[in-house]
Amino acid sequence: MKKVSLGNTDSKVSQLSLGCMYFGSKTDKKIAYNLLDQYIDAGGNFLDTANCYAFWIKDSIGIESETLLGNWMNDRQNRADIFIATKVGANMKDINKVKDPDGNLVSNYEDFREGLSKKTIIDAIDKSLKRLKTDYIDLYYAHIDDINTPLEETLEAFNYLVDEGKIRYIGCSNYRTWRLERAKNISKTNGWAEYCCIQKLHTYLRPVPRAKSIYNKNSVRFTDDELLDYCIRNEDVSLLAYSPTLLGLYNNKERRSDKKNWLWNDYSSPDTEARLKAIEIVAEELDITPIQVLFAWMQQNNPMAIPLIAASNEEQLKENLESAKIDLSKEKIKYLNNVSS
């Protein structure tokens, strides 16, 4: 697996990042350890987690993923070989207030997000460092935007942590493009650390106009043309793509017919049907899977995106990892980009 540049940093990260959201909760220790070992053996080094994964799972409180990764790195004694990314801002202020007696989320749980105040960030980093069993984080994200806290306060807190040596780089997730640009300008003006990347829900399919964010109105999941153009013109900001497979929509037709599937409702359209067909055609021509076409396209398109791959078993992860070896021709990429209903 090759290494690629990360935004405005001097660091190189693997072209596929391993999403560790459910490690320690839905994915138990044995399976998670096997998947982590498999990813590292394939040449990967870029692990993605957050200080809230995965609080919404029954019997979970949001510390499971970081805790498992910390234990794994400690057991393998490989911290120096790992580029670890975690996040702050989307965790619950009090997990006991967002779950009912049966362990299910209450309807207004969004009201209890921790936000991005200086105090929250300073308190959260030490907890993440302890769980991850490390004295520094490579990449620290603002998980979702917090319009109730001035950007200056958030960015100054991040810069303080960089100066303290507790984090190396900062990124943002689910930001609108104008908020990213404003944050970059504030950092430049003050000589502070700048966001080196943005993580969004990015995939080959395009959401329908009615699609809505699951976060507050100022934090948006989806990439749009404005952000893609911004990343093309600003090479100091890398694009990272979470949930690129849309929870199996590319290779599981049953999920597409499930009206309760909120992701399919956000993407269901003639344009999506045409694009799914195009992916399948290219996959058949190259004798690979639609998922592998998707990941190869993301890595070779402009702007290039680093996909966050995820898996619940070794076969799934192998399929994802194989995409790093696939070279799509310029003609194939042009064909995929020009598809529409």
Image (cartoon, rainbow, N blue to C red):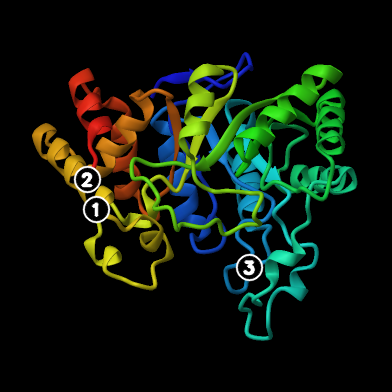
Callout 2 amino acid: Ser
Mark 3 and mark 1 in contact? Answer it, CB < 8 Å: no
Q: Nearer the viewer, residue 154 or 160?
A: 154
Mark toward the start of the polypeptide (2 vs 1) = 1
Residue appearing at x 34%, y 23% in the figure: 300
Residue at the right extreme?
Answer: 119
The image's mark for residue 60 is 3
Check the picture and name the quadrant holding the N terminus.
Answer: top left
* Image quadrant where residue 267 sits: bottom left
Which numbered dot is residue 270? Answer: 1
Distance of mark 2 from mark 1, alpha carbons? 5 Å
Mark 2 and mark 1 residues within 8 Å of each other at the beta carbon: yes
The amino acid type, in three-letter code, at marker 1 is Pro
- Residue furthest bottom as drawn: 101
Task: Give the crowd class for mark 1: few <14, some 14-19, many >=20 residues within 10 Å.
Answer: few
Q: Which mark is residue 341?
A: 2
Q: Position of residue 253 (x, y in %)?
A: 22, 61
Residue at the image point whose x is 12% and y is 36% from the top? 287
Question: Residue 18, how many percent across, how many down?
Answer: 48, 40
Displayed quadrant of residue 134: top right
Lower position in the chain sequence, tag 2 or tag 3: 3
Pick the front one: 71 or 98: 98
Task: Name the residue located 58 percent from the left edge and 30 percent from the top edge.
Answer: 82
Which sits earlier in the primary sequence, circle 3 or circle 1? 3
Element type where label 1 sits in the image: helix
